[in-house]
Amino acid sequence: MNLTFLNAAFLFGALVALLPLLIHLFSRRRVRTVDFSSLRFLRELERRKIRRVRVRQILLLIVRSLILLCIALALARPTLRGALATGGGRARTSVAIVLDASGSMSRARSGGEEERSLFEDARSVALEVAGLMDEGDQAFLVSAAAPARSLIPGGTFSRTTLSDAILGLEPGPRSTDYRDALETALELLSGARNLNREIYVIGDLQRTGWAGAVRAVPDDAPAVYLFAVDGSVRNLGVASVAAGRRYGGAEGLYSVTVEVQNGGARGAEVPVRLFVDGVQVGRAGVDLPAGERGNAQFSVSVDESEWHSGWAELPADALEFDNRRYFTIPPVRRLEILVVRADGDGGRDDAYYVGRALDPDGRGHRFRTSVIESSSLPAQDPMRFPAVVLADVGRLGGPEVEWLRRYVSDGGGVLAVLGDKTDVRYWNGGELPGSNAVPLVEPFHQASGLRLAPSGRGHPLLEGLVFGERLIDDIVARRGFVAEVTGVEEVLEFPGVGPALLIPRGSEGASGEVAVLLTGVDPEWSDLSRSGFIVPLLHRVVEQISGRGSPAEGVLVGDDLASRLPGSSGGRAQVTLPDGSVSIPEHLGGPGGAVVHRDAEQLGVYVFSRGDTDKALGVVNHDPDESHLSAASRSDISTMLSGLGHQFMDPSSEVADRVMEARRGRELWRALVYAALALLAFEMYLARHRSG
Amino acid sequence: MPDESYRRFLDPAVVSKLATMELRARLIVEGFVSGLHRSPYKGFSVEFAEHRQYMPGDPLKHIDWKVYGKTDRFYVKEYEEETNLRGYILLDASASMAYSSSSDGMSKLEYGRYLSAAVAYLMLKQQDSVGLLVFDEAVREFVPPRSSPRQLHILLSMIDEVEPSSVTDIGLVLHDLARRMARRGLVILVSDLLDDPGGVLPGLKHFRHLKHEVVVFHVLDPREAEFDFDVDATFRDMETGELLTTEPFSIRRDYKSAVRKWMERLRRECAESRIDYVPVLTTTPYDRALFSYLEKRKRLG
């Protein structure tokens, strides 16, 4: 049993119940003394009557205090919850139903003869809860599929509206976010009309759906009731697909790595099929222990001049949406590369050698370079250059730094080559993009060879450039910088000194990447300019850092999918969705600028186009975490819900009974008012006797 | 000046009215023999006054045989003679007699003074002897009955000087006086009787037992009878100082009932003993109360 007060502020009014006592005490003090001839008769009466009068006085005092107390408590609206609060009484309630419509809910329930998904079970529970709405009750419906959102703006007081909204909801490929959904529900209920508030969470309570403890729990938080619908946790899913260009071989050769995860309790041999442009191009088997991940490798050959898309596929199982994962292979195009030198520099500096390496014969076969001084940087069109090389630029002015930050934030890639003009303190100040991740310790002035770093082994950019653990060329660095890095991939190193080349591996996201070469290309610094290694190395690095506009692996369902349409053909951009429908994307800025399709809902390949020639592909995939189907433990959930009173309910029982039993609250204000009236009548009777 | 202070008891209007009044003993009292025996005192007039019915114990020589012959009933002759009626005025001067419910009203003692003065004047006017006994828990002052012209001055002076004090023990005083009285007389008690009736009534009856005639003027303040207080109060006994806090309006009805029963008991037992019980309130003018009583007494014979 639980007694709560819906208007707890009025409890202070209970102090008014002390008023009769105070008046009585105050009056007693003011009783005067009167001389009387004889107390003979009064003494006799005291024995019989006056004591009774005193008892009646005390009784009147108690009754009057109780009247005021009843009124104050009635105003505080006490509500009794629990099995003892029977009688059919109930308080008006505002309810938020958090219904899990994430991808994991589309799997079949465990056991049972009927083919029925978990979401259908959850929906049945939600409809039963909705059926308990009474006059004056208010309801909100929140989807727990990320990002959580309210499906009935402003809520509803209509049972029909709520039921229709529940029936109109279907599970999608989105991942789960219970924390976000609960926080949304709390925010919705904070403005609710009724003071009695509840949250019903109905779903598989998937462990990966609990990102952390619920934040901003108010003092008068509503009660939370959790209904867990159970389903099978056996599941195989494609966790990731990475397509990378292979160097050192035929043109158009790509390596595709498919990562598969086994969410079951038993090991399995998983057949993986690879499709490119709709045609199966490979099949491989992966032996996966229970709970483990494994990779299947494929090599494909495509026309480098065009866009290609494909997917990796597993056999059908209980959860369909994670059995396929999409990828794209962008065409290899000539790229405009901006090479920036310090103001006043010229001649054969780092910028010269970088430019020569990228475009050896000056014809711009693969890269067309534009070399400028740093002060000219703010005047450049960032959309024109997918990559920028900072060739030993040293300190930059405010406008240049601002331009670079915006450029990287919009997806542009930067290669920073450090040299003579690099100021360690300035670099460590963090103004330049990427400098925070690569703090410099000090320059070094000793000869050091350039070597493959242990973590660089197998890096696709060095394919064909290493023999075993040795580079194809012996390169000496005479000067460089010592750096302490964590979390950044080291590709090359100075043996015994530290990293030499840091290139982040490809990752999803719209912001650009920054690679850092900790020695100069200038012959005074290293032999790179004299080595044949420099050309393929710079080509591959620049190619990699310039490829962020259309990430091969795409974005997760529900995210914004952006693309950059090259060329300057006229016409409006459009995006064709996987189901064939066409949408108009949002422009982020200028012709040739990025376009974005917001809140991509469908899994698959999206085709961005403008006119007949400009085309780019993007893919939307599921969140691999959603493939982990095991539910969070009750203790873990309770930890996440600390600060929120909560109960775990059994959805297999009569939901209505359980809900009403949990909710059954009887407002007691009426009873208190009746009690006050009865006490008032009694007081009048006692007081009437008094004047007799 | 003492002479000036007690003269207030001789209001001319009251005195002139008293001149037409008399207070005679109704019951046989011992006195000088009249009519049949030579009085040792000269100057007595022995004139026939009236008949009255024979009562056992009356001397047979006073029977009027003529009336018997006519009526077959025994009557004795009363003579208009100086019977030397001895009157004893007993004035209660205990602390409770000082009570007055209003600041400008008359206290019971003051009322008693006036009443006592009037009775003394009346009796002396009709050449009876009258004495005064002032008491509280014991006899404080005593003036034996006399009929001299100076007696009035003596009595009025004493009446004027009486101050209330101490507690009451009426019964003890009555018994004490009863023992002292050698001859039968008329006892006039002026008191609030706020004492144990179990002590008061035997004292009064003691007088009757000794063949004295007794008149009780029961003087009360109206508030003592009505108890019409309207606020809670702590009451202080004027004689004992005892305190008691109560709600007057809650107990008023019961208080009045108790007072009524008390007075009823006094009236009943006084009547049974042929004691005149005269309850008076201090708001009733004393002369009116006295005259009313005298007229009633005269009517009833």
Image (cartoon, rainbow, N blue to C red):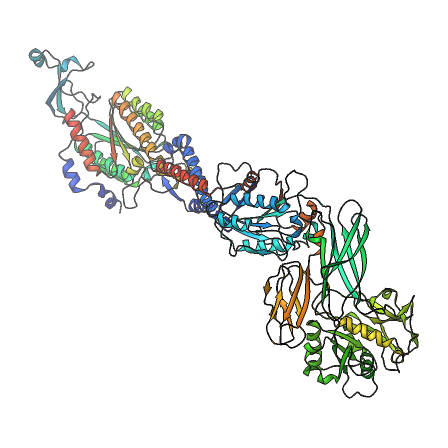
Q: Nearer the viewer, residue A90 or B23?
A: A90
Where residue B8 sits, quadrant-wise, is top left
Residue A602 visible in the displayed image: yes
Front residue of A29 and B30: A29
Vertical relation: B128 (above or below) A299: above
**Residue A63's x, y, as percent?**
44, 39
Total residue callouts = 0
- Residue B284 x %, y %: 22, 38
Image height of B122 relative to A600, above or below: above
Residue A482 to residue A236: above or below:
below
Which quarter of the picture shows residue A65?
top left
Q: Residue at x 26, y 20 (%)?
A: B272
Q: Quadrant of the C terminus of chain B?
A: top left
- Residue B150 in view, yes or no: no
**Left or right: A278 as drawn, with respect to B132:** right
Foreground of the two, A65 or B27: A65
Foreground pick, A418 / A522: A522
User: In the image, residue A614 lies at what x, y percent?
Assistant: 66, 72
Q: Position of residue B267 (x, y in %)?
A: 27, 26
The quarter of the picture where residue A238 lies is bottom right
Answer left or right for A680 relative to A334: left
What residue is at 59 percent from the left and 65 percent from the top? A583
